[in-house]
Amino acid sequence: MTCPACAAERHRASYLGRFRFDDLEYEYRECRTCGSLFADPMPDAGLLERLYSPSYLTDHYESDLAGETAIPELGTELEEVARLLARERPGARLLDIGCGAGRFLRVARSMGLEGEGFEPQRATATQAASAAGVAVHGGELTSLVGPYEIIHLADVLEHHPRPLDLLLPARNLLAPGGILLLRGPIENQPNLFQQALRAQRLLRRPFQKARSHAAPHHVVLFTLRGWHALATRAHLSIREERVYEVFWPVPHRFTPRPTWFLKAASRWLSASRLGRRLSLGNRVVSLLQPVPAASG
């Protein structure tokens, strides 16, 4: 396998160890070039279809992310991104790839943008259209008719076994001078909490068997370097970017547990001047624009 982020061929076993989901036993490999992690083997098309069936939309988006109850920072991020895009391209035609239950589309529409959504499974797209109240396309991304002045992907790339195969057709749907907004987790980007987790897992790994019932929803765990490498491979240049740390995977609400205090300290360090200089964090928001393919 090659790294889905940077396409490097050299990789090694990671600190996360092995997992099992149904009949699939897999591990996360660490790319020796960009440091991103990726599932090996990747889930096949049949398993992916099961993982992202309409029930996933109901269970994951409607009950959790639609209200941003688990990760309150994402609600703030969503609002800020929608305002940014509305300022950049007032009244623009927008495509939200992986639109879920459509909260971003609803907010974008309230700010004057003409939004449409996309979900690869047609049944999920139908359910998402009903939830969002706007057109949501299903099937193949290459079947859509552009151009779009804005393309938005939030918390999508980490789910795709071949994220470049998603970014390239998305880029091709952009109008001349269009912009692409990517946001999502960079789960293997160094920060205090991630490094503590890494040390703990490395110490325990020789004594652990494969952990069961761990669905490979996130098949790529990016570093910022891997995120940038993927953008470069898709012939996209970064115009603006923000790296920061959210409370996830620790519950946001205070609990008197060591992990909560460690995460709070990690977020403080990531938000400090030193942390910003070192790009500490676990989440990134990138505003990109196409560059000629020959220069990529």
Image: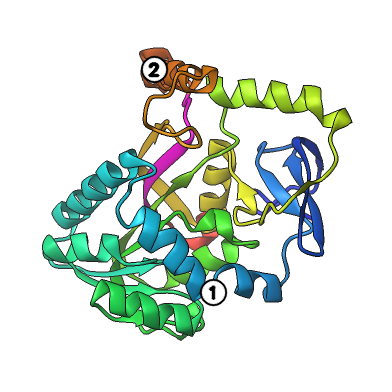
**Residue located beneath label 1 in the image:** 53
Q: Which quadrant does the N terminus fall into?
A: bottom right
Determine whether, in the image, residue 84 is placed left or right of residue 20.
left
Crowding at dot 1, Cα within 10 Å, few <14 / some 14-19 / many 20+, comes out as some
Q: What residue is shown at x 40% (from left), y 61% (from top)?
A: 61
Residue 51 is drawn in which quadrant? bottom right
Which of 90 and 217 lies nearest the eye of the viewer?
A: 217
Q: Position of residue 39 (x, y in %)?
A: 72, 52
In three-dimensional space, the C-alpha distance between marks 2 and 1, rounded to whole angstroms, equals: 38 Å
Q: What residue is shown at x 80% (from left), y 26% (from top)?
A: 204
**Residue located beneath label 2 in the image:** 268
> Is 17 drawn above or below residue 236 in the view shown?
above
Q: What residue is shown at x 50% (from left), y 67% (from top)?
A: 56
Q: Where is residue 129 in the image (x, y as percent from the top left)?
A: 32, 79
N-term-proximal mark, 2 vs 1: 1
> Hey, what amino acid is under mark 1?
Ser
Which of 145 and 127 lies nearest the eye of the viewer?
A: 127
Q: Which of the numbered marks, if any, corresponds to residue 125? A: none
> Is 273 drawn above or below residue 54 in the view shown?
above
Q: What residue is shown at x 12% (from left), y 63% (from top)?
A: 110
Determine whether, in the image, residue 155 is placed left or right of residue 226.
left
> Hey, what amino acid is under mark 2?
Trp
- Residue found at the far front of this picture: 256
Nearer mark to the viewer, of 2 and 1? 1
Q: Where is residue 43 in the image (x, y as percent from the top left)?
A: 72, 64
Q: Does the magenta stretch include residue 258?
A: no
- Dot 1: what SS? loop
- Dot 2: what SS? helix
Q: Contact, CB < 8 Å: mark 2 with mark 1?
A: no
Q: Main secondary structure of the magenta part?
A: strand
Q: Position of residue 245 (x, y in %)?
A: 42, 30
What span is colored magenta in the figure? 279-288
